[in-house]
């Protein structure tokens, strides 16, 4: 019987469990022995894995986090780490590994593929910052969590005629900020992809809306822009509006996945096994225009993705 492994690596994302479930279930159904590798590449280097069966993935589709645990693994990037992983793959006759994670995890998958262990990547990150995919597992849940949190902040912000400056996750990408910002009617959204001028984009916009009677404000800032505490102080000093800074942080990474995350994760897990079944490795499963497709890992890692600037423009035009 052929053996394949599945692991989750990098920052966890709601929906990863649904992807694991799909890999294990379709793997078993297609006659594979499926090994669950714990804590990402670390588990592969040190042989920390166990055989999974249809029932190992019962009651997980609704759970956030990852039952296989996750880690970032600097050792795996070294030649020595790679050798350890290859040895373990040989020991277990591992003929393929499904890697659920972000770009960093795919670089590991590419390097392992180059050394003869076929890998298939599944995009799992709340940031939606994987170039070959319109959509990554966890993104929808994270956006909805951010929206719910900002809605709560709005209640108290409005009661006190205040300004809330809210940092949402997204180190290099403003997807969560842009969409949560639109959904919450933020006065201004600041994202790493677009240069901003504090006076023009924050203060002047606040003043403009103030003239039409607005008395409370929500400013959404992507993590990659940062500086919410300083911004709140400046707003208070320049506008005389009491301001509070809130960093939503890791709450956005947890929680029960939305329908969309569960369904897409299931489709992607299923597709990954289909590829391995046909003996195809070195691929990344992706979603493009609502279709599940796959790309060569090398090609996928060289692709570029840009945020929708029309959506960004619209967000500001309708938030006055
Ligand atoms: O990549 C997902 C992400 O949540 C980013 O938005 C954030 O910058 C980073 O991970 C946080 O990483 P850590 O969990 O290591 O603090």
Image: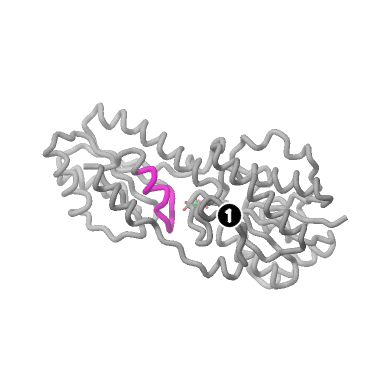
Side of 106 where 115 appears, left or right = right
Q: Position of residue 86 (x, y in %)?
A: 76, 67
181 relative to 119 in the view: left or right: left
The region drawn magenta spans: 169-181
Q: Nearer the viewer, residue 277 or 94?
A: 277
- Residue drawn where x is 21% and y is 48% of the image: 234
Compared with 276, 114 (above or below) is: below
Residue 293 is situated, as x and y percent measured from the top left of the image, at: 60, 57
Q: Position of residue 164 (x, y in %)?
A: 29, 39
Residue drawn at x 71%, y 50% is 38
Q: Is 148 on the left or on the right of 156, as rendered?
A: right
Does the magenta-highlighted stretch encompass residue 6? no
Q: Which residue is disc 1 drawn over?
A: 123
Image coords of residue 258 (percent x, y): 54, 37
Q: Quadrant of the C terminus?
A: top left
Q: Is residue 180 magenta?
A: yes
Give the residue at the far top of this rendering.
159
Mark 1 nearby-residue class (10 Å; few <14, some 14–19, many ≥20) = many
Q: Quadrant of the N terminus?
A: bottom right
Q: Nearer the viewer, residue 232 or 114?
A: 114
Element type where label 1 sits in the image: strand
């Amino acid at each position: 019987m052929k053996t394949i492994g599945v692991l989750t690596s990098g920052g966890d994302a709601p929906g990863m469990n649904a992807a694991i479930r799909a890999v294990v279930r379709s793997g078993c159904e297609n006659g594979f022995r499926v090994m669950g590798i714990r804590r990402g590449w670390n588990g592969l280097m040190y042989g920390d894995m166990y055989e999974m069966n249809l029932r190992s993935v019962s009651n997980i589709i609704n759970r956030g986090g990852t039952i296989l645990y996750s880690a970032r693994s600097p050792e795996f990037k070294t030649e020595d780490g790679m050798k350890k992983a290859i040895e373990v793959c040989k020991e277990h006759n591992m003929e393929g590994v499904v890697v659920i994670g972000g770009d960093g995890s795919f670089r590991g998958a590419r390097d392992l593929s180059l050394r003869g262990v076929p890998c298939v990547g599944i995009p799992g990150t709340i940031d939606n910052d994987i170039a070959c995919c319109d959509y990554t597992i966890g993104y929808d849940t994270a956006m909805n969590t951010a929206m719910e949190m900002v809605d709560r902040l709005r209640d108290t912000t409005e009661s006190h005629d205040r300004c809330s400056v809210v940092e949402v996750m997204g180190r290099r990408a403003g997807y969560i900020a842009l969409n949560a910002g639109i959904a919450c009617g933020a006065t201004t959204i600041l994202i790493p992809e677009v240069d901003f001028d504090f006076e023009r984009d924050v203060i002047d916009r606040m003043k403009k809306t103030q003239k039409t009677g607005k008395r409370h404000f929500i400013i959404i800032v992507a993590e990659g822009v940062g500086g919410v505490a300083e911004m709140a102080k400046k707003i208070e000093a320049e506008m005389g509006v009491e301001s509070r800074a809130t960093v939503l942080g890791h709450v956005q990474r947890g929680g029960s996945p939305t329908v969309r995350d569960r369904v897409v994760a299931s489709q992607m897990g299923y597709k990954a096994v289909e590829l391995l079944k046909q003996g195809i490795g070195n691929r990344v499963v992706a979603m493009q225009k609502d279709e599940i497709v796959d790309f060569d890992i090398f090609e996928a890692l060289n692709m570029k993705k840009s945020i929708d600037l029309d959506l960004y423009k619209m967000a500001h035009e309708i938030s006055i």
